[in-house]
Image (cartoon, rainbow, N blue to C red):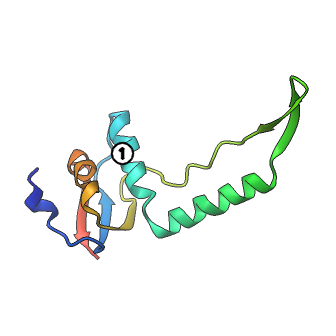
Amino acid sequence: MSTAAFDFKPGQTLRCTITTEPLVEDDRQTLMRLMRNDAGIKRALKKGSRDRMKNLYVRSRGKRPWEVRRKSATIAKVTKGESWEMPWFPHAMHDMQRVAKYIDVKAA
């Protein structure tokens, strides 16, 4: 896809919707990375991170304190019809071009 398809101004809010689910795991991870730019998803991940650090379990390993860190929640789910808003930044163009066949992008 050409760069003219993503002719947005930096900072402009985009509305992205998943039209088809990718079968390739790399494309799925790219979509999840783009979805994490949504303000609501970002806020939920940050809150979860704070909660995990508050409830950190410390055990002994080799007679030293060892923090057992829990995995973060998967809040950004790649399913058909899922949509998110994100600000446009030019360095995301390559990721957007990579997954352009799976998403519909409009200015919000």
Q: Is residue 56 above or below residue 88?
A: above
Residue, x 71% and y 42% (percent of image)?
Answer: 70
- Kind of residue indicated by mark 1: Thr
Residue, x 80% and y 48% (percent of image)?
Answer: 56
Q: Which residue occupies the foreground of this view, 14 or 92? A: 92
Residue, x 79% and y 39% (percent of image)?
Answer: 67
Left or right: 61 as drawn, with respect to 96: right
Observer able to see residue 46: yes
* Residue 106 coordinates in the image, percent (x, y): 23, 69
Residue, x 11% and y 56% (percent of image)?
Answer: 3
Q: Is residue 54 above or below residue 61?
A: below
Quadrant of the frame with the C terminus: bottom left
* Residue 74 coordinates in the image, percent (x, y): 56, 49
Counting the numbered discs, the total is 1
Left or right: 106 as drawn, with respect to 24: left
Q: Is disc 1 surrounded by few (<14), some (14 to 19) or many (20+) residues within 10 Å?
A: some
